[in-house]
Image (cartoon, rainbow, N blue to C red):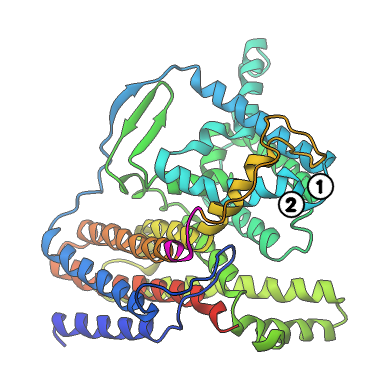
Amino acid sequence: MSRRRVGAATAAVAAAAVAAAPDPALAHGLVGRQDLPIPRWMFAWAAVTVLVASFAALAALWPRPRLQTLEERVVRRVPALLDPVCGAIGVAVFAIVVYAGLAGSQTANANLAPTFVYVIFWVGLPIASLLLGDVFRAFNPWRAIARCVAWGSRRLGAVADAEPLPYPPWLGRWPAALTILAFAWVELVYVGRDDPSRLAILALAYAAVQLVGMALYGIERWEERADGFGVYFGLFAALSPLRWRRGALLVRRPLEGVVGMLTVPGGVALVLVGIGTTSFDGFTNGTLWNGSGGGGGIAGFLTDRFASLGLGAENALMAAFSVGLVAMVLFVSALYRLGVQGMHRIGGRYAARDLSRRFGHTLVPIALAYIVAHYFSLLAYQGQATGYLISDPLGRGSDLFGTASATIDYGIIGATGIWYVQVGALVAGHVCGLVLAHDRALATYRNPRDATRSQYWMLAVMVAFTSLGLWILSAAASQ
């Protein structure tokens, strides 16, 4: 079969997959959409058309790799004092959130901790990282504490000859991947996820683990490999054209910074966990998971099975959601693995594991797109709650900054606007993934024809992820 016919067949199958998906609807934190200006199915066809057109344009207009060599330039010098000041602010915010969780009202909506952790931290930071660079690294509280302790120790001569332990190369970023999976489990499965005091205790425990790891293996090495949130947010920051370095602000081409970040063990798994857990959050709003009329569905079936094993109702429900969470991560991983196996057949020069790591960075913009698509309205609406929560972080009636009477403006963006943001994010994320994949293929395969042929598989993967995203957004529509 000719290359043109293969490409046409792939595009047709992918388009049919999206067109067959149900109309988009709610996901976690998303409002419903009514009276859209054009039919919903048209959005699906438009998304596939954009991807196929982008693929064709890249094949014709992008003949050589352009993103494989990082090129940065300094655009502004910044005071060296900015770094410790940002670290001190991060420590202060962490202390306030933990104190609010432990000492404040244990009503989730009245306490600062749940909104800060699940909205500002988990959803807001990835978006801020894309726009502003690695802001989390600058404000990372455990990094700031570790650096302060190390500085004090050096001044006292306590660690003059001490060297950190070598970080095991085989461990790579697996600790980071497991951290993100564990956090997603707390957010989506754990019944005590909204309990402010439990959140505060978990935050303290995580900080303690990070400090021990940094003490053993070195601050920078541990942060780059094992600090789950530092690595995860750092991936999104690598998509940004901005990079902050001590004493300087640098600029680079967008997407360029992420190219070499996932070649270590566990790096690809981290991104797949991010996509899979976000997908599961949306999936749990749908009929397939919950059943029609509030009964049955996969969740009901699994819960009944676990209850029959002697688990209580609460534990059986958590076990069912745990199975669903892991299953979705494995499903997403299988989609990517399928594309890698297809590329493995082209040219025959590279093992599947090698290709998986070489092209893993192409998934990073997709992971960010899923976050925006599924949580944008949560950030737009519930994020406004920070206005009154910072004045009354403990939920005891204080008004520290005069904003305790502020309310959430649900008219800040309409349902149609949210829908445009969701679909736009999914399409933009997948187009960026195609750009990164095409550029890496040109650098990987000696024969340009093989490079193009390999990308039929990546196009299929990108369309599959687009289909999955649109279908999950539509899942709640039938409830």
Question: What amino acid is found at the position of numbered circle 2 in the picture?
Answer: Asn
- State the residue position of label 1: 197
Q: Residue at x 37, y 24 (%)?
A: 248
| Relative to 144, 42 lies left or right | left
Q: Which mark is residue 342?
A: none
Say whether disc 2 or disc 1 marks the residue closer to the N-terminus.
2
Pinpoint residue 94: horizontal percent, then vertical percent: 68, 35
Q: Is residue 386 above or below residue 425?
A: above
Pinpoint residue 238: horizontal percent, then vertical percent: 39, 45
Question: What amino acid is found at the position of numbered circle 1 in the picture?
Answer: Ser
Q: Is residue 413 within the magenta segment?
A: yes
| Relative to 323, 279 lies left or right | left
What separation in Å lies between label 2 and label 1 (alpha carbons)? Answer: 13 Å
Q: Is residue 27 above or below residue 405?
A: below
Residue at disc 2, secondary structure: helix
Q: Is residue 162 above or below residue 102?
A: above
Q: Quadrant of the N terminus?
A: bottom left
Q: Residue furthest top?
A: 156
Tell me which segment is drawn in magenta: 412-418
For marks 2 and 1, give the one nearer the viewer: 2
- State the residue position of label 2: 109
In front of the other: 218 or 130: 130
| Relative to 289, 133 lies left or right | left
In front of the other: 77 or 287: 287
Pinpoint residue 363: horizontal percent, then vertical percent: 40, 61
Q: Is residue 96 within the magenta segment?
A: no
Q: Quadrant of the C terminus?
A: bottom right
Residue at disc 1, secondary structure: helix
Within the image, what quadrant is residue 141 found in? top right
Q: Residue at x 49, y 48 (%)?
A: 126
